[in-house]
Image (cartoon, rainbow, N blue to C red):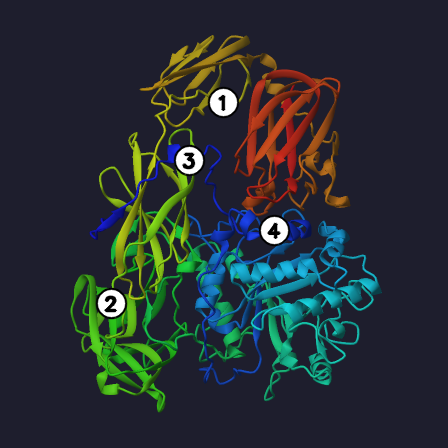
């Protein structure tokens, strides 16, 4: 934990004085259906401030690439689902280490934030953290407008709503798209119309819509059209630019969109390139798509059609779903290895991709670009995620996190490690860091015979009279380290500057004076490792690398002003969250860090943001504390902290417990045991159980195991206590002991099942009772909530429990697991009684045992079908167990 020594301004905000309706709630990234988009405004959206990017699009340059095969003319567009779902995406990162923190921006010219579904929303702007990360690296990032095919729930009325035109010729939806991009700070839209049902008139209306969007957007915004809809209005992928779809790119000499993404089955790209030229457009406005969602770098691509040997590239390259690397990975380390092979090639060297494998890496085809062209430049090799968080080498958080807004500019080349022997191995390492969650680790056997030159950054930095370079490192052995600089006048030669050969288990910073090179331009930055003696277990962490002008005016930042808690909420008396807001400083701020002051005076980092609003995730009350202090401190580009400003939240009175429990089974044979699980609120400090005819008959354990030896029907009572009081719950006739218990079976298997609706013919209600989870056998429902699934057992039975296999059981994303549901029972199908109520489920499979009840009909009512806002129900199996 960390104590901030700087003085602070103390502001007091008593949360108890806030309106009861001022619930903080986690802010989420936006998504809309057309009708919602048309009604949206920043003023009416409580999450809008959290979804804004504060980092402008940086300039970057390509220069000469390190790969002899790569060229600069073709561009790369990546369509990547950087988050697992459209809904439920936290606006400012989360407390999970595992996240798709994409880092190969150097090979991407435009990134499309892929998302949208018929169950969540079809208009999806990028999340704020992805905009920040893209802009830091000089990459424009686009939102997605996705009209799904009918088989995936697409409705043509959504197309019609988007294409509505006012009498004055304006398109309200186009104006909203422009407003959203300008307000959130991203760079355009990818328009993907795949819903069937269009006419030639609709196609002309779509062209007019796109033309309006193109002519009214800012010059920096980019509009991309996907090769799907034709001039006849139908959906027919051309896999080319031709007369059927050209009007959506260029029409009668007028630019309709900025570029077009060609579908994946292209065979003759040269004809598309010639068609573009005939329209007065560059062939590199066309992005020949490859679909890597399923197989990643094992995807078969006829690269020679796009990048013919010895000839210029024919068009640009479009990559659909490179997020495969994250989705298929077993760990973050595996994810980064897959990313490297995908972008750099199987040999892991962007400068040499002459592999015998078919997939040579994107670096083999396009030259890398770099945003490192302005001082100061500083990197802590922070990937934007971590298992811990460090500030100036001190751990201030011991739990996982991700926030792509905090990602540093990472090495341009991963990796070029030149050596006459076996080179040292560089990795981005999460085990230790100087600032953030990761550092650069270089390790292996080091000797003079395998001295290693690790080339890191492509740069364009002018050295002034007072320019200095600093490197912060940690090593148990001698550093044996030099910093390499290549200059514009001799880009292939490096000058090496010695780093002090100081062994220290703590972080050490050495500052090097670059005055002798005044006026030169640094075009490459590297590290060189060499030693006279062999070091068999050489390992060094590079925590920070900085180049800056010592006289640049960058004073210590003052305390932020007008810090307030705008909203707060408490749950069960021991959990609380808050939304904070403050006035942004006029000075250059890299980020604002938010700390919680613990009762012992130590501090833990809650998170950081470049924005001036922050959601403090739900905190657990510690030792019945009455007040919690939160601090906000600004950090400048040199990673120097300013003064801290504080605000207080006051906790409500410490609550007495609420008793609740469940049994793993309620119908048992004589002598069989039942596992009881306490579900009382967390403030419970003591438990007193009474089991009618149970053995034992009483217990003070939290989760007792009890045997029932005699046939009969028995009640169970739990009293939960703490220092504030107690609560008692009795469940009458909960346990039935019968010799027939061994005959319990799944009564729903193969019975008649009906539902409110189905996503398609192959996803109807019968799939939920067919006993299959494989082969995508599920009941799925779209549309208005709640959804329901009803089972007719054919006769009355004694029902003892229910089991549900949710989305994750069938291999889908855990975010699609049902959150809230009710199970009802009925004897006649008319009068229903609630048997089970569940809120906040996250599990892939749920089991709910109940007191024995007689019923013929069972209804599963889906109140909240997913962990986010997706309204599609996904049930792979619904079991009703009983006699």
Which mark sits nearer the N-terminus, 3 or 2? 3
Residue at which label 1 appears: 662
Residue 272 lies left or right of residue 9; in this view the side is right
Which mark is first along the chain, 3 or 4? 3
Q: Nearer the viewer, residue 40 or 601?
A: 40
Question: What residue sits right under mark 2 in the picture?
Answer: 472
Residue behind mark 3:
18
Q: Which mark is residue 40?
A: 4
Q: For mark 1, give the secondary structure.
A: strand
Q: Residue at left 59%, top 24%?
A: 836
Neighbour class for label 2 at 10 Å: few (<14), some, many (≥20)? many
Element assignment for label 3: loop
Disc 4 + disc 3, Cβ < 8 Å: no
User: Alpha carbon of mark 4 to alpha carbon of mark 2: how far?
Assistant: 47 Å
Q: Residue at x 27, y 74 (%)?
A: 552
The spot of residue 601 in percent (x, y) is 22, 41
Viewer-closest of 773 and 83: 83
């Amino acid at each position: 934990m960390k104590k901030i020594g700087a003085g602070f301004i103390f502001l007091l905000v008593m949360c108890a004085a806030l309106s009861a309706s001022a619930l903080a709630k986690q802010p989420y990234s936006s998504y809309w259906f057309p009708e919602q988009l048309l009604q949206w405004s920043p003023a009416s959206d409580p999450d809008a401030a959290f979804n804004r990017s504060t980092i402008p699009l940086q300039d970057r340059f390509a220069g000469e690439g390190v790969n002899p095969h790569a060229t600069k003319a073709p561009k790369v567009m990546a369509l990547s689902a950087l988050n697992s779902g459209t809904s439920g995406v936290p606006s400012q990162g989360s407390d999970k280490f595992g996240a798709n923190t994409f880092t190969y921006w150097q090979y991407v010219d435009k990134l499309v934030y892929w998302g949208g579904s018929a169950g969540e929303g079809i208009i999806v702007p990028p999340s704020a953290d992805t905009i920040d990360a893209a802009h830091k690296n000089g990459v424009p990032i686009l939102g997605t407008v996705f009209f799904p095919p009918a088989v995936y729930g697409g409705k043509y009325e959504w197309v019609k709503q988007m294409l509505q035109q006012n009498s004055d010729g304006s398109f309200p939806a186009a104006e909203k798209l422009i407003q959203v991009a300008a307000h959130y700070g991203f760079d355009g839209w990818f328009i993907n119309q795949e819903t069937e049902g269009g006419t030639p008139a609709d196609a002309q209306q779509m062209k007019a819509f796109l033309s309006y969007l193109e002519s009214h957007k800012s010059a920096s915004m980019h509009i991309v059209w996907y090769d799907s809809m034709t001039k006849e209005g139908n959906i027919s992928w051309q896999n080319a630019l031709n007369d059927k779809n050209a009007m959506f790119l260029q029409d009668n000499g007028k630019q309709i969109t900025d570029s077009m993404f060609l579908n994946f089955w292209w065979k003759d790209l040269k004809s598309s390139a010639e068609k573009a030229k005939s329209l007065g457009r560059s062939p590199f406005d066309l992005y020949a798509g490859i679909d890597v969602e399923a197989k990643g770098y094992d995807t078969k691509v006829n690269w020679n059609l796009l990048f013919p040997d010895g000839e210029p590239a024919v068009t640009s390259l479009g990559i659909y779903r490179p997020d495969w690397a994250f989705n298929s990975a077993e760990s973050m380390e595996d994810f980064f290895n897959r990313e490297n092979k995908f972008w750099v090639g199987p040999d892991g060297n962007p400068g040499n991709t002459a592999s015998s494998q078919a997939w040579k890496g994107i670096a083999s085809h396009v030259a890398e670009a770099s945003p490192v062209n302005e001082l100061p430049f500083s990197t802590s090799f922070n990937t934007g995620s971590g298992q811990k968080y460090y500030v100036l080498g001190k751990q201030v958080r011991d739990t996982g996190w991700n926030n792509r807004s905090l990602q540093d500019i990472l090495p341009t080349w991963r990796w070029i490690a030149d050596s006459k022997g076996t080179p040292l191995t560089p990795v981005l390492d999460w085990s230790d860091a100087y600032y953030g969650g990761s550092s650069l680790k270089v390790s292996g056997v080091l000797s003079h015979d395998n001295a290693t030159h690790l080339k890191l950054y492509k740069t364009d930095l002018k050295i002034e009279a007072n320019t200095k370079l600093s490197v912060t490192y940690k090593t148990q052995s001698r550093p044996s380290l030099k910093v390499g600089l290549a200059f514009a006048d001799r880009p292939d030669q490096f000058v090496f500057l010695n780093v002090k050969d100081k062994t220290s288990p703590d972080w050490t910073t050495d500052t090097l004076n670059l005055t002798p090179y005044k006026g030169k331009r640094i075009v490459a930055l590297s590290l060189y490792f060499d030693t006279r003696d062999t070091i068999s277990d050489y390992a060094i962490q590079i925590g920070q690398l900085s180049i800056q002008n010592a006289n640049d005016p960058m004073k210590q930042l003052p305390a932020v002003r007008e810090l307030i808690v705008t909203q707060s909420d408490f749950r069960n008396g021991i959990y609380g969250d808050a939304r904070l807001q403050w006035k942004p400083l006029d000075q250059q701020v890299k980020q604002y860090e938010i700390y919680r002051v613990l009762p012992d005076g130590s501090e833990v980092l809650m998170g950081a943001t470049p924005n001036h609003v922050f959601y403090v995730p739900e905190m657990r009350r510690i030792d019945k504390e009455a007040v919690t202090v939160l601090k906000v401190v600004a950090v400048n580009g040199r990673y120097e902290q300013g003064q801290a400003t504080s605000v207080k939240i006051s906790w409500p009175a410490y609550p007495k417990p609420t008793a609740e429990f469940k049994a793993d089974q309620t119908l048992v044979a004589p002598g069989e045991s039942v596992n009881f699980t306490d579900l009382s609120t967390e403030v419970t400090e003591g438990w007193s159980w009474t089991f009618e005819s149970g053995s034992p008959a009483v217990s003070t354990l939290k989760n007792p195991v009890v045997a029932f030896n005699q046939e009969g029907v028995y009640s169970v009572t739990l009293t939960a206590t703490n220092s504030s009081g107690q609560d008692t719950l009795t469940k009458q006739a909960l346990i039935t002991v019968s010799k027939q218990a061994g005959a319990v079976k799944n009564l729903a298997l193969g019975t008649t099942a009906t539902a409110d609706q189905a996503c398609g013919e192959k996803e109807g209600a019968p799939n939920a009772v067919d006993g299959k989870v494989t082969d995508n056998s599920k009941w799925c429902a779209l549309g208005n909530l709640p959804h329901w699934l009803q089972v007719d057992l054919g006769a009355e039975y004694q029902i003892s429990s229910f089991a549900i296999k949710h989305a994750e059981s069938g291999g889908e994303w855990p975010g699609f697991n049902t959150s809230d549901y009710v199970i009802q029972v009925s004897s006649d199908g008319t009068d229903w009684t609630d048997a089970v109520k569940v809120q906040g489920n996250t599990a892939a499979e749920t089991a709910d045992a109940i007191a024995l009840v007689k019923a013929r009909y069972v209804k599963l009512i889906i109140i909240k079908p997913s962990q986010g806002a997706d309204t599609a129900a996904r049930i792979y199996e619904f079991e009703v167990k009983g006699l």
